[in-house]
Image: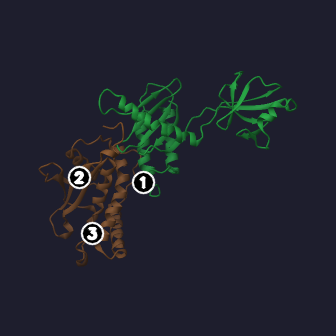
Amino acid sequence: MIVYSVYIVSKSGGLIFNYDHTVSKVEVEQTFSYPLEFKLVNENKRVIVSFGQRDGIIVGHVLMSVNGISLTGQQLDDGKDVFEVLENSENYPVSLKFGRPKMTTNEKIFLASMFYPLFAIASQLSPEPKSSGIEILETDTFKLHCFQTLTGVKFMVVAEPTDIKLDVLLNRIYELYADYVLKNPFYSLEMPIRCELFDQNLQLLLEQVEKSGLANI
Amino acid sequence: MARQTTKLDTKKVSAELFTLTYGALVTRLLKDYENIDDVNKQLERMGYNIGIRLIEDFLAKTNCGRCYDFRDTAEKIQLAFRTYLGVFPQVSNWSAANDEFSLLFDNNPLTEFVELPDHCLNLKYSNIFAGILRGACEMVQMEVTSWFVQDQLKGDNITELRIKFIKKLEDAIPVGED
């Protein structure tokens, strides 16, 4: 059982906690000669491969560094513009590193707030009155399990797609939240969770689930 | 304060330490506020802040579902007193409309060593309970109010806490929740 990440959304729909557990790192570094056989574009403040997929370099991956110099936006850390460097044949051969884009915290907050209305729509679509919202959302590569408490807090676990019900795990996370977040007198409700003890115990729990499954948690 | 049933938490705190701590808290409040009504109000407010957090612990550990009538609620409040304080209050004196009941305590762990002095007969020593109940119920979208009808500290035979249902907070009920 592999758990990818855990999210907690507050009563009012804001993301108050997120934790990435297992993120497979996909990074490729290769040396290229002029001209490049694939197209790069600047999208959402990142330089990504838009066309020309070839050995390990996948459309959608981001450019992480040029000759070992990393970049922010389209500017290299030494002040040069990436596109200018790559257009100039004198700079070749050049070594480029590509990787899977990581979600930024802002994107996560944005996505979490998108989930909130989806959840509400799901509950209204139901033919019977008073249905629950989304409990499981399934895709090719993962399954999202969502659990809403009576008080309106949502716990979400993104895990590998299996048929196993994750109710037990979600409930254990709820218990950890009650113990290490709410019982911390310096935590204020509805605010982002920054509690070391909670992090530690959550990590422990997820490792245990990974090793021995859901049976003994 | 200690839960017996969880694997995680085997720590227990001596009941006496708990009682003494609460006593110290109340006497401190009496020194800080001249007016006894203010002390009662502060105790209730503290309780409220405990209640809004404690309810999540209760729900997480007991797997309780939503209450469909006030009798359900009464049962769960009774269970909560048992879980957190180890006392078994009796539920009784239901009103005709089923929206009001009393919890009868034979003994109250908060007041074990307490004798009220003459100058604070108005003090609601255990008013923190009223706050906890209000806070906890509010988080599950129910407005209640509670007050002490009888108190062993004031010479009654039992301590009676009366709880009244006011309304459901419909607006606050989360979507996808029946």
Could you tell me which secondary element the residue under label 1 belongs to? Answer: loop
Q: In which quarter of the image is residue A145?
A: top left
Q: Which residue is drawn at 45% across and 43% down?
A: A13
In this figure, which residue is indicated by the disc labeled 1? A183
**CA gap, disc 3 and disc 2:** 34 Å
In this figure, which residue is indicated by the disc labeled 2? B166
- Disc 2 marks a residue whose amino acid type is Ile
- Disc 1 marks a residue whose amino acid type is Lys
- Disc 3 marks a residue whose amino acid type is Phe
**Depth order, front residue of B127/B17:** B127
Query: Chain A shown in which color?
Result: green
Front label number (3 vs 2): 2
- Which numbered marker is on residue B113? 3
Front label number (1 vs 3): 1
Number of other residues with Cα within 10 Å of mark 1, as a class: few under 14, some 14 to 19, many 20 or more: some
Say if mark 3 contacts mark 2, CB within 8 Å: no
Residue A37 vs A195, above or below: the answer is: above
Residue B95, how many percent across, how many down?
Answer: 13, 52
Could you tell me which secondary element the residue under label 2 belongs to? Answer: strand
Q: Can residue B19 be seen in this view?
A: no
Query: Chain B shown in which color?
Result: brown
Residue A65, how many percent across, how many down?
Answer: 74, 36
Number of other residues with Cα within 10 Å of mark 3, as a class: few under 14, some 14 to 19, many 20 or more: few
Q: Do labels 1 and 3 share a chain?
A: no
Judge from the rendering whether residue B136 lies leftward or rightward of residue A43; answer left or right.
left
Report in which chain the residue with disc 1 lies. Answer: A
Q: Is residue A74 visible?
A: yes
Residue B4, how many percent across, how many down?
Answer: 33, 48
